[in-house]
Image: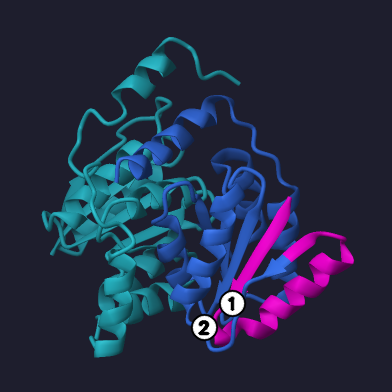
Amino acid sequence: MKVIIGACSEAVNLKDVLCEWMNQQGIEVEDVTKESMNFFEASEAVVKEVLKNKDEDRGIIVDETGAGAFMCASKHNGIICAQLNDEHSAKMTRDHNNANVITMGCRVIGTGVAIGITERFLKGKYSAGRHKIRIDMLDRMGEIS
Amino acid sequence: MKMAVGCDHIVTEIKDDVVKYLKKKGIEVIDCGTYDKERTHYPIYGKRVGEKVSTGEVDLGIVLCGTGVGITNACNKIKNVRCVLTQDVCVARYAREELNANVLGFGGRVSGMGMIEDLIDAFLKTEYHPTPEKDAVIEAINGLIQHDPACGKEDLFDDLLEKWDRGEYHD
């Protein structure tokens, strides 16, 4: 598993905190952030990389509130995105939704919670089973678009 | 003002409270279900709400499931839906002001009813003030889905539901 991370220019500091934490954990990280990105550009850069190996790799997009990046990422076929600012949802969305991308807002969230969310998102396992029909439905909505 | 509301079976009672809250405000509400606690699937209801928003049948939508993640993703897979998933007033406000969000999503197992009412109030009170820059970003988000034959296709999930009925999706 590789983590692809990207941030808009306002959220670079939080992105750097998360990169440092992931590096300490020995997690492979690819930072696709470029100077002066807006949330749309950051989101597209992350999604493009995640879609190359969407069942293995994970994406993290940080912007001001998480909302803009969430709208962008969740539009893509094959992406299930969670706009998060609590650790409970981070755990549940891996378990039930098989989310492969999350967004967080640097104006909304502190570094402790952001790291907690990242940890749960990266360690959480998808339980499939009865949940899989819902994921098949989301995929179906994207496939025929 | 006309709104569509949708949920899955985990949070039906909270959805019913949301519908009551909206009606008390004088809002006309289309309750897209689900209507009971029988196990069902959030994309069905997210799609219904998204379609009503996308076609202009309603002005705005509200969706909820356990965390809100599943149903908001279904909504956003419909063209021209801009659904926000939040538990904070400042984000609900930002999504309306900056992104002209047309669906509010939250987790019924994450936020309590007091917070939910606050989120709804912020979402309804805040207006989008267009600028060319904001309009361009919104156009770019809408452009991520070019063509959306899923919208309005009522039998989209039929074969998957048949598989479910045959017991092919089991834990």
Where residue B136 appears, x then y in whole percent? Answer: 28, 81
Q: Residue at x 20, y 64 (%)?
A: B25
User: Which region is colored magenta?
Assistant: A1-29
Asked if residue A6 is positioned above or below residue B42 in the image, the reply reads below
Q: Which mark is residue A37?
A: 2
Report whether mark 2 lies on the same chain as mark 1: yes
Q: Which residue is drawn at the image coordinates 30% and 84% (left, top)? A: B134
**Residue B54 horizontal side relative to residue A92, left or right:** left
Disc 1 chain ID: A
Q: Say which label, 2 or 1, has the lower sequence index.
A: 1
Query: Compared with residue B14, is residue B42 higher up or lower down, i.e. above or below?
Result: above
Is A2 colored magenta in this rendering?
Answer: yes
In this orientation, which residue lies closer to the viewer: B40 or A118?
A118
Residue placed under numbered mark 1 in the picture:
A7
**Position of residue A124 measured from the top left corner of the image (x, y, whole percent):** 71, 45
The chain letter corresponding to blue is A
The letter of the cyan chain is B
- Measured from the top left, where is residue A74 in percent x and y? 43, 56
